[in-house]
Amino acid sequence: MKTRITDLLGIEHPVIEGGMQWVGRAGLAAAVSEAGGLGIITALTHGTPGALAEEISVVRSLTAKPFGVNLTLLPTLKPVSYEDYVQVMVDAGITIVETAGRSPEPFMPLFKDAGIKVIHKCTSVRHALKAEKLGCAAVSVDGFECAGHPGEDDIPALVLLPLAADALSIPIIASGGYGDGRGLAAALALGADAVNMGTRFLATREAAIHENVKQALVDADERQTALILRTFNNTARIYKNKVAEEVVALEKRGDATIEELAPLVSGKRGAMVYETGDLDAGVWTAGMVAGLIHDIPTVEELVSRIVADAEALIRERLAGLLG
Ligand code: NAD
């Protein structure tokens, strides 16, 4: 399958790993790239700019294929020196960066000078248009189904993607709710050039997280997520566990402060879920696509299956409808 995204990024399949805090590590990213997709490591997962530089070296020791680095620009409980992470990416000769959250505008001159292709992840057409104007090479358009931060407009992909495709000239990656060949074929039909998958890649052999989390995704249905931080205009879709329910209850009260919620929503605490397998140790990110996850394959098996299923769907079912 050749699309504007496979051409732009120099990859074989239009399948991209979502930027996942605590999960976007070298092993998984290299596996996705080796399988013909685009692996992405997440800058903030590594704690310091120096540790990110080391992780980039590890990816390079595992694959010679293209990969990217995610830089999430959202509120954090502790200040983050984004400039230092950006400098590491530039110095390491990174060629693809995924930005998310706030506009990447302050960093665009640095990225442009270094010849870095920027994919900006957005949840609205207006933000996608701004990204195009700033010189981003592509946008990742996140529907309301997505894990992590769906924004505040709540527009699902069925409406958001065609609107984005009508408005933009740059390639579009569809994000949020993708996990199988049907999703890939649908995203292409709606005007996207690739899919971005996070939660689906959590349930693969190569994801360096506890088996309990992978099994929880296999067991989950599509209603197993909760929306938190709505009252802070920083909505996050996470796995619905005891901590998520506690946060939702506190926010319902109407006057919860971020200081009050911090011990519950802290990413450091949430990371313990992936480490220990205690599903209630903190908050952890998952999307509605959990309902479509029924196994824990290797990344190679998953990517091949998705592409083969999408191709068969387009060639046989859809083309067949034309008689
Ligand atoms: P963290 O521990 O600093 O913060 C925990 C949560 O609280 C995050 O959702 C953060 O956005 C939110 N938050 C922090 N301060 C806030 C404030 N003043 N007002 C409103 N909300 C606030 O974050 P972390 O878990 O270490 O993650 C680091 C960054 O990555 C954060 O920006 C987070 O939002 C983001 N993230 C993204 C994903 C994803 O979907 N790709 C998943 C997890 C975290």
Image (cartoon, rainbow, N blue to C red):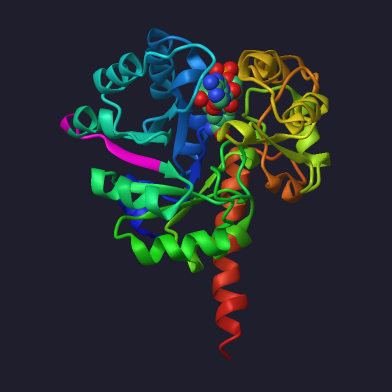
Looking at the picture, how far across and down is residue 28, in whole percent?
A: 55, 29
Rendered position, 124 above or below 60: below
Residue at left 40%, top 33%? 102
Q: In the figure, is residue 95 to the left or right of 180?
A: left
Q: Residue furthest bottom?
A: 323
Residue at left 63%, top 31%? 229
Q: Quadrant of ligand 1?
A: top right
Return the residue nearer the eye: 228 or 162. 228
Q: In the figure, is residue 240 to the left or right of 305?
A: right
Q: In the figure, is residue 232 to the left or right of 87?
A: right
Return the residue nearer the eye: 183 or 80. 80
Whether residue 10 appears in magenta in the rendering, the answer is no
Rendered position, 270 above or below 229: above
Q: Is residue 63 visible?
A: yes
Return the residue nearer the eye: 220 or 255. 255
Residue at left 76%, top 33%? 252
Return the residue nearer the eye: 323 or 164. 164
Q: Residue furthest front?
A: 255
* The N terminus - image quarter: bottom left
Which residues, given as a range, are shown in magenta? 113-120
Q: Looking at the rendering, which quadrant does residue 183 occupy?
A: bottom right
* The C terminus - image quarter: bottom right
Q: Is residue 27 visible?
A: no
